[in-house]
Image (cartoon, helix red, strand yellow):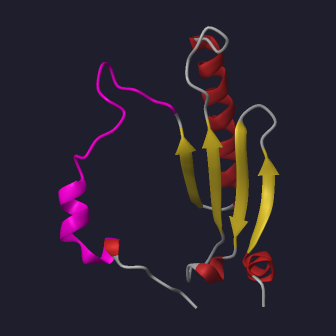
Amino acid sequence: MGMESLCSDYVRVLKTSENVQCIWLQCDKRMFGLEEDVIVGATYIKPQSRDFPVRAIQTHFTDLFEDTLGAFQVSPNVVLCGDFNAHVGELSEVSDAHTGFVLDCPEVLETRRYV
């Protein structure tokens, strides 16, 4: 049995956003043992540049917010992930602040399989 047939039993494309690079997937509640499905949004927001100014970024985040509200109309279980190209002031976008947590929690390091 191929991976494609396994995925198609539990995951379907709910929406591909028109204004933002984002795909929304609806994952069957049985995957997580929940009472309602899980909606996953995977997005990419381009970094600010001469061709993509702050106003365009603001518009993309507004569109993404509206898409997220729409996802909550389908299920209360919504996960939004991706590359938001966000920076906080002059801080580096790479951080090892949580390395200790990861190393102290073997559950995070071990591969989990749900059947």
* Magenta-drawn stretch contains 112: no
Give the side of residue 19 with respect to residue 39, left or right.
right
Image quarter where the C terminus lies is bottom right
The percent position of residue 91, horizontal first and vertical second, equals: 29, 26
Q: In the image shown, does 85 or 67 lie closer to the viewer?
A: 85
Q: Is residue 39 above or below residue 15?
A: below
Q: In the image shown, does 29 or 98 lie closer to the viewer?
A: 98
Give the side of residue 100 with respect to residue 68, left or right.
left
The percent position of residue 75, horizontal first and vertical second, equals: 66, 62
Q: Residue at x 61, y 11 (%)?
A: 53
Image quarter where the N terminus lies is bottom right
Q: Residue at x 72, y 60 (%)?
A: 25
Res 6 quadrant in image: bottom right
Q: Is residue 99 above or below residue 55?
A: below
Q: Residue at x 60, y 29 (%)?
A: 61
Q: Is residue 38 above or below residue 113?
A: above
Q: Is residue 57 above or below residue 35?
A: above
Give the side of residue 53 with respect to residue 7, left or right.
left
Q: In the image shown, does 82 or 78 lie closer to the viewer?
A: 82
Q: Residue at x 65, y 44 (%)?
A: 69
Q: Which residues are magenta?
A: 85-108
The percent position of residue 46, horizontal first and vertical second, equals: 61, 28
Res 65 quadrant in image: top right
The percent position of residue 8, horizontal first and vertical second, equals: 80, 76
